[in-house]
Amino acid sequence: MEVAFTVMSRRIEIAPSVLPCDFSRLGEEVAALEAAGVDRIHWDIMDGQFVPNLTIGPDVVAAARTHTSLPFEAHLMVHTPDLLAPRWVEAGCERLIVHVEACTHLHRTLGHIRSLGAKAAVVLNPATPISTVEHVLDLVDMVLIMSVNPGFGGQAYIPTMEPKVRALRAMIDDGGYDIDIEIDGGISPKTIAGAASAGANVFVAGTALIKHADGLQGGTADLRARASAAVR
Ligand code: DX5
Ligand code: ZN
């Protein structure tokens, strides 16, 4: 198994999106990802309203829960994250990630998630400025920057998100917070170095990992090595 290591004090983590997996055998798929050395499982939850696509509910995540000991996080691309928040926690998600654009009362929603015993994180669409999270940094352990418009796997990485990641890293560090930056969308052997050098340390990878020519284990090692080399 690939060794986890820390670069510039933040741990590099590979968080596969299950979107390209075989949904008829998700248990085996997450077990295979764990064997390949990934760090957590990133569940892309879509409600068919906030984004023009629909994926899975908490019962499906709960069914996969017994097949791996990896942490689960739920990326909630939904208009009403508060509604099912308790269900996602019961399903075994240790972190709920909510969209700034979906939350009228973001501060309240993050507090609600924490009150359920879960970690709270926040995610920004490509057009959403980082100023929208400036006053909730004390409530989150991670900020996710979308490097595609959410809704589908397999889209092209938007490189202009890198200055945004850089500015967010500076904002977090200036405030003295202990917060990871995750990046999601189009992360591949070609794009991961740019994202890492901008300051992201958690990398969601769907298509490029699940379909990697070297297989899951080789692909995980490849992505981790490239991210590490970029910040060394
Ligand atoms: C997009 C999702 C992603 C994405 C990752 O709405 O949040 O997690 O599908 O997949 P790739 O790596 O294929 O872009
Ligand atoms: Zn995602």
Image (cartoon, grey):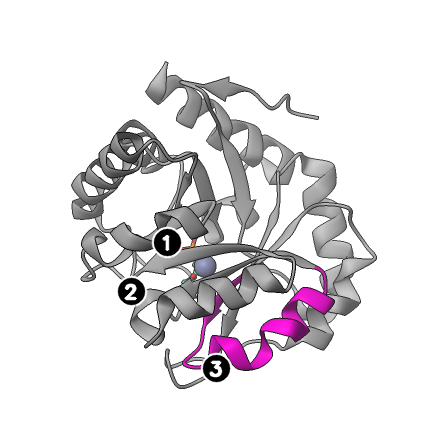
Is residue 93 positioned above or below 15 on the image?
Answer: below
Q: CA distance from mark 1 to mark 2?
A: 8 Å
Decide whether residue 90 is among the magenta residues. yes
**Please, what secondary structure does the residue beneath circle 1 have?**
loop
Task: Tell me: is circle 1 under 8 Å from ligand 1.
Answer: yes
- Which kind of residue does numbered mark 3 sit on? Asp
Is residue 189 positioned above or below 157 on the image?
Answer: above
Q: Nearer the viewer, residue 33 or 102?
A: 102
Q: Are marks 1 and 2 in contact (CB under 8 Å)?
A: yes
Where is residue 78? Give x, y as percent. 44, 77
Q: Is residue 49 visible?
A: yes
- Category of crowding for the residue at label 1, using alpha-carbon neighbours closer than 10 angstroms: few (below 14), some (14–19), many (at least 20): many
Where is residue 193? Give x, y as percent. 33, 29
- Which kind of residue does numbered mark 1 sit on? Gly
Q: Is residue 124 left or right of residue 8?
A: left
The mark that comes first in sequence, 1 or 2, is 2
Decide whether residue 34 is among the magenta residues. no
Residue at 78% across / 56% down in the picture?
28
Where is residue 218? Give x, y as percent. 59, 31
**Please, what secondary structure does the residue beneath circle 2 have?**
loop
Q: Residue 149 has which mark?
A: 2
- Which residue bears the numbered disc 1? 185
Task: Tell me: is circle 2 under 8 Å from ligand 1.
Answer: yes
- Which residue bears the numbered disc 3? 47
Q: Nearer the viewer, residue 4 or 96?
A: 96
**Please, what secondary structure does the residue beneath circle 3 have?**
loop
Q: Is residue 150 visible?
A: no
Magenta stretch?
Answer: 74-92
